[in-house]
Image (tube, rainbow, N blue to C red):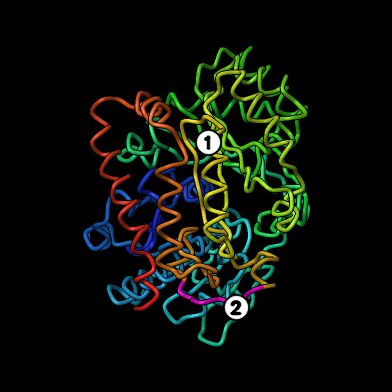
């Protein structure tokens, strides 16, 4: 069979996303790796190549698979409608994060199969059965839907990450030079773990594994790293550092294997605060950048979201990372309840951190999270295009135009000019015009986001 796997682009009204980072479609590369060798597979990345019609007409796929986060829901449903209009015989299959936490949003005649959970093995079974003309009802976890489609709910009990094949990076050669995160380009991605022990109110990732932290064996990770050509590697984990003994063993194996890469990974501030020696070990084998979710600068706010960490841990982590000369990507959240004094306090504290980059997002109740269940009756919009971490989904204390002016001011005034120049020096000279353009567009749109709610 001919199979087309599609990575959707963010909707036009959503902010952020591929404006500043485009990570390789690792989930689709895993799906492709799981398909039997006698099937033909192509990956289309609509973030970089929007010409779907040419591919549909030229390639003539029999199965189209799409993945979706919450912000992609409307886009994916429109794509499936378009695909069925092109050829009603094409089987459409949707999976990914949102299909796992809220599959009912894809109950439509234009979607034939919804896969909730890890999709590699269920997708392989779907393709094999479609190829042989067999029904999907006998597949474990299959639930027939009223519109004629099928939901496949997969249990992850006993699931092992090392059971998955290596992702098919050979299917994205035309795009690989375009995968990046800020100045880190070209950038490959690798998954070494899944899940988290913590129970953050705003996160659903821990629920997907029942609170378990699934890990790959260091030997398998090193073997896969040896196949990656890109100089930069992003660890696409929910949290990379939780198992500190495993990460220490992995760093030692990478050193002994002589693999020379520059790494970007996630780490909790409390883990960093307790294990500075682990960060130093990783620094010595190529760690360049650490994403750390600081979330808030007040313990009361951290307790409210059940972060399980403290402001003291945040301060210790930043000191350790700075001392090692690692690039820091800290992320703070803005609560819709913030007033002008809250914004001013956050600006002042961020300036005092003396960092080159600081990210901000609006606290967002995503489907599947405890936060969503607690506040869903108070949402001011249910348009998934706005679930982008910039549009507020809850009422704000400040009038909306003032809230977004304050948020834009956070981005502009949370770093000194010296630190902004320090960040720009990380880019190649030819990349700066695109950076200035993207940043200018972000600032311009932030100030006018309030207008979207009137539409």
- Residue that numbered label 2 is attached to: 378
Q: Residues within 10 Å of mark 1 (few under 14, many from 20)?
A: some
How far is the residue under mark 1 from the one under mark 2?
31 Å
* Residue at the farthest front position: 341
Magenta residues? 375-383
* Mark before the other along the chain sequence, 1 or 2: 1
Q: Is residue 35 visible?
A: no
Residue 42 image position (x, y, % from top left): 37, 50
- The label on residue 50 is none
- Please name the residue shown 69% across and 68% down the image: 140
Residue at x 69% of width, y 72% of height: 374
Would you place residue 420 above or below residue 304 in this image?
above
Could you say whether the residue bearing mark 1 is in a helix, strand or loop?
A: strand
The residue to which callout 1 is attached is 329
Q: Is residue 46 magenta?
A: no
Seen in the picture, residue 169 relative to 227 is either above or below; the reply is: below
Total marks drawn? 2
| x and y percentages locating residue 338 in the rendered image | 57, 60
The relative height of residue 376 versus residue 406 in the rendered view (above or below) is below
In front here: 265 or 402? 402
* Residue at disc 2, secondary structure: helix
Instruction: Identify which residue, 246 or 441, lies in the foreground.
Output: 441
- Residue 417 position within the rendered picture, expressed as x and y whole percent measured from the top left: 38, 31
Residue furthest toward the bottom? 146
Q: Position of residue 224 (x, y in %)?
A: 56, 29
Residue under the point 60% across and 18% down = 324
Disc 2 crowd, CA 10 A, few/some/many (<14, 14-19, 20+): few
């Amino acid at each position: 069979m001919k199979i087309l796997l599609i990575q959707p682009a963010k909707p036009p009204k959503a902010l952020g996303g591929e404006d500043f980072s485009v990570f390789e479609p690792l989930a689709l590369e895993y799906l492709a790796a799981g398909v039997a060798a006698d099937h033909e597979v192509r990956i289309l990345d609509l973030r970089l190549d929007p010409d779907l019609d040419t591919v549909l007409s030229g390639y003539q796929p029999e199965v189209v698979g799409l993945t979706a986060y919450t912000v992609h829901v409307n886009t994916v449903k429109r794509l499936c409608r378009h695909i069925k209009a092109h050829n009603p015989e094409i089987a459409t299959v949707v999976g990914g994060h949102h299909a796992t936490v809220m599959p009912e949003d894809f109950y439509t005649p234009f979607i034939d199969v919804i896969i909730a959970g890890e999709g590699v093995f269920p997708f392989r079974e779907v393709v094999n059965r479609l190829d042989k003309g067999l029904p999907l009802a006998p597949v474990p976890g299959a639930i027939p839907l009223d519109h004629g489609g099928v939901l496949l709910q997969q249990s992850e009990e006993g699931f092992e990450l090392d059971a998955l094949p290596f992702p098919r990076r050979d299917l994205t050669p035309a795009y690989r030079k375009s995968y990046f995160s800020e100045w880190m380009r070209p950038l490959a991605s690798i998954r070494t773990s899944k899940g988290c022990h913590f129970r953050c109110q705003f996160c659903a990732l821990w629920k997907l594994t029942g609170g378990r932290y699934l890990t790959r064996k260091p030997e398998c990770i090193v073997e896969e790293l040896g196949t990656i050509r890109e100089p930069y590697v992003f660890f696409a984990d929910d949290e990379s550092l939780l198992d500190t003994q495993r990460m220490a063993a992995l760093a030692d194996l990478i050193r002994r294997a002589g693999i020379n890469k520059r790494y970007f990974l996630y780490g909790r501030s409390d883990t960093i605060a307790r294990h500075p020696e682990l960060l130093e070990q990783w620094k010595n084998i190529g760690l360049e950048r650490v994403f750390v979710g600081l979330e808030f600068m007040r313990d009361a706010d951290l307790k409210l979201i059940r972060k399980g960490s403290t402001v003291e841990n945040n301060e210790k982590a930043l000191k350790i990372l700075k001392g090692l000369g690692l690039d820091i990507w800290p992320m703070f959240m803005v609560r819709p309840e913030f007033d002008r004094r809250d914004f001013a306090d956050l600006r002042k504290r961020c300036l005092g951190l003396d960092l080159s980059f600081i990210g901000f997002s609006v606290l967002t109740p995503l489907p599947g999270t405890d936060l969503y269940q607690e506040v869903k009756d108070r949402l001011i919009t249910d348009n998934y295009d706005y679930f982008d971490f910039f549009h507020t989904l809850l009422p704000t204390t400040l009038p909306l135009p003032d809230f977004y002016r304050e948020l834009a001011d956070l981005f502009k005034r949370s770093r000194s000019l010296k630190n902004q120049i320090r960040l720009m020096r990380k880019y190649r000279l030819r990349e700066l015009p695109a950076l200035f353009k993207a940043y200018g567009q972000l600032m311009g749109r932030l100030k006018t986001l309030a207008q979207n709610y009137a539409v």
